[in-house]
Image (cartoon, helix red, strand yellow):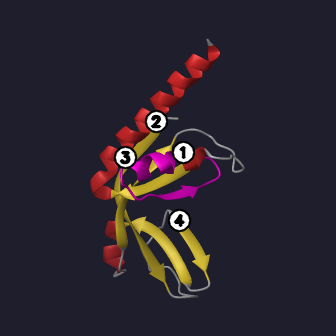
Amino acid sequence: MTPQLHPEVHVFATLPPGALLPEGVEPIMRFIEREGTTLIVAESQAKAAGLAGTFRCRMITLDVHSSLEAVGFLAAITTRLAAAGMGVNPVSAFYHDHLFVPAERAEEALNLLRDLAADSVRSAQRLST
């Protein structure tokens, strides 16, 4: 696993049920629920469109293709971040998993994930000897 930290700051925003996306808003995620539509969008786009955003975050892409049916992969990752007192909002897409972590702690999250990846490699090496 190679975590990749993206530079943009994102926010979570909502639209009322049935509302159209404001012009200029290109969410990286859109999820439709009964109460409204949740967007993950660049903070700059949200501000320009007058959308109230919450949870200023940055996205870390886990550069490993994991099965959508994989068991425990994200649990190990979110447990490591939780142990550091860090909230995380994971999103599983078809090709990769993505973690949305607090913007001000993004570098710390990246380092924790790199440590976790190194620990996994060491464990695998011990098991193979």
- How far across and down, in percent of the image, does residue 59 sit? 42, 53
Q: Is residue 105 above or below residue 51?
A: above
The magenta segment is 77-95
Q: From this viewpoint, which residue is outermost toward the right?
A: 69
Nearer to the camera, 22 or 121: 121
Confirm whether residue 112 shows in the render. Answer: yes
For image coordinates 63% across by 15% down, the residue present is 128
Real-space Cα distance between discs 1 and 3? 14 Å
Q: Is residue 80 above or below residue 127?
A: below
Q: Tell us which disc is closer to us: 1 or 3.
A: 1
Confirm whether residue 96 shows in the render. Answer: no
Which tag, 2 or 4, sits closer to the chain's start?
A: 4
Disc 3 to disc 4: CB gap under 8 Å: no
Which mark is on residue 29? 4
Q: From this viewpoint, which residue is outermost toward the left?
A: 104
Q: Secondary structure at mark 2?
A: helix
- How far across and down, in percent of the image, does residue 91 sit? 55, 58
